[in-house]
Every structure is written in C-alpha cells, then in structure tokens.
Amino acid sequence: MTSTHWVLTLVCADRPGIVHAVSGAIVAARGNITESQQFASDDTGRFFMRLQVESDASRERFIAALAPVVERFDMEWHLDVVGRPIRTLILVSTAAHCLADLLFRQRAGQLAIDVPLVLANHEALGDLAAFYGVPFEHLPVTSPESKAALEARVLDAVEEHDIELVVLARYMQILSPGLCERLEGRMINIHHSFLPGFTGANPYRQAHQRGVKLVGATAHFVTRDLDEGPIIEQNVVRVDHADSVAQLTAIGQDEESRTLRQAVKWFSEDRVLLDGRRTIIFK
C-alpha cells in the first residue's frame, strides 16, 4: 500500500505518560515517526507536541488509533498531510515587496501556500498579482462604510475559498475588533519594526532621525490589540549613521519580507502552536 506522510500536532495539560501513549497509538496505526518535537510550558502547564509520521493506514484508521489517547488526555489535535498547500488570502495596499516575495516563493515551490485571491484597498499591485496569475480585487477604503464593505468581502472570501490563513502583507488599514476575533489564530501581520518601535506612516525616516543601530521586523498573529498579538518571528539587521533613508527603507523591507515569509512557512507546516499570548514554534 502507498504510505502517507502525516503531520500531527497535539496540545493538552502536561502529565506523565503522554509521549508513551502517543507513540503506542502511532505504532497501532502502522506509523514510522520521521520527526518529533515536544515542549512542556512551566507557565501554563500545557504540553505541546508535533510529529511527522509515515504510515500506510488510511486517515480514518489513523484517527481511530489516536482516539483513545486524545480522549484520555483531553487533547486538542490536528492531523494533516505534510506539504499540503494551505489556502491563503493576502491583503495588500501599495507596498509590493512582501506580496512579491510570497507569490514568488509559492511559484518556486518554496512555500506551501495556495493563493486564490489578493484583496487590496488600492489598485497599485494589480499588475503584480496578474504576473503571477493570481486573481486581484480592489475595494477602496475611503469611509467607515467602505471599510466595512471590504471586511465583509474578506469574510465572504474566507468562506468562498475555504481560507485557512489570512496574511496582511503590508495592508495599511486598522482592522475592526470583530474581524480580528473572527479570524483569531489564523491571521498574520508583518510589522515594520522589532516591536515595540516607531509608529506612524514613515518609520524609517523616524529611525534615521533617531540614529538607530538596528532595523528589524516582527510577524505576529492579529488580535483586537492590534500589534500586540502573539509573536511568531522577529529579525534585526545592524545599520549605522551612514545609511540614508532610502537605504534604511530597502534594508527594512528586506527584513519584512524575510520575516513574514518565515512566519507563513512555519504556519503552513503546522509548526506554530499558541500558548496563551505567546507562540510555541517547532522549527
């Protein structure tokens, strides 16, 4: 029989015997563990585990083998196929760097995402989406009513395309608390600094004026607290007084693209688990 490479994530209260029980269930499903990572949080008392398993058992048989363990330890769990592209909706405004990077990596087979739609509040990136063959919709946001219309379209698109992840690829609109709550845990934003940092529309000019020595980026889950959601990835690069505003902008945009790409990659590979206000990342 043809074997399937599964990825399994498990979360439950920490207690003795979990790894032994899970391993036994995988053996019962004729599985061979190819990757295994685990973490017990002293802060929350929760246990996190991610495994990749090769097995010739069907999904139904695999789930049946796991069921007694899941019930015994009252586990939250997720089972998927390794490398399956996750359906991803991307929101953009006018900055092209993050969108270009994500779509290029998807086409190159370096990112396991399937993008059925790019949704924007400006027309500027329509040609870029078209170059990669991705449908593009423009809904201008010029009033509270048009903002509500765009957010309604986001939710419609999530249902229409069975979206698993929403990415704000430098989408420059503050989302409503209602939308943030509806998509909590599956919406990622890229922030133009190593949080906390400079706020406003031109952070790199502020950074230049203040003579910063580090430029960075932070990818995080979106919550109603805006830029205070659980952090997935952060990167910084050293700069100095000789760098112009344009140079700082270019350096910063590179970091934004790299950081967002990494966060999306980890999410698509089921490597990101939530532990309250922070994340557990199984790299």
Image (spheres, helix red, strand yellow):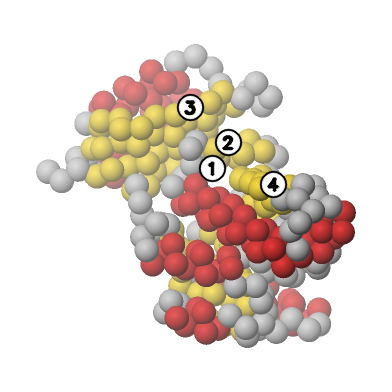
Where does the N terminus fall, quadrant-wise? top left
- Which residue: 59% across, 68% down? 97
**Residue beneath label 3, please?**
38
Residue type beneath disc 4: Arg
Residue type beneath disc 1: Val
* Secondary element at image label 1: strand
- Which residue: 67% across, 38% down? 278
**Residue beneath label 4, please?**
238
First of labels 4, 3 by sequence position: 3
- Which residue: 54% across, 75% down? 118
Whether residue 75 appears in this view of the structure is: no
- Are the residues at dot 2 and dot 3 in contact (C-beta closer than 8 Å)? no
Whether residue 84 appears in this view of the structure is: yes
- Which residue: 53% across, 59% down? 165
Few, some or many residues within 10 Å of mark 4 (<14, 14–19, 20+): few
x and y percent of residue 272 in the render? 53, 42
**Residue beneath label 2, please?**
280
* Secondary element at image label 2: strand
Disc 2 from disc 4: Cα separation: 27 Å
**Residue beneath label 1, please?**
272
First of labels 2, 4 by sequence position: 4
Few, some or many residues within 10 Å of mark 2 (<14, 14–19, 20+): some
x and y percent of residue 192 in the render? 71, 58
Which of 278 and 243 lies nearest the eye of the viewer? 243
Residue type beneath disc 2: Ile
- Are the residues at dot 1 and dot 2 in contact (C-beta closer than 8 Å)? yes
First of labels 1, 3 by sequence position: 3
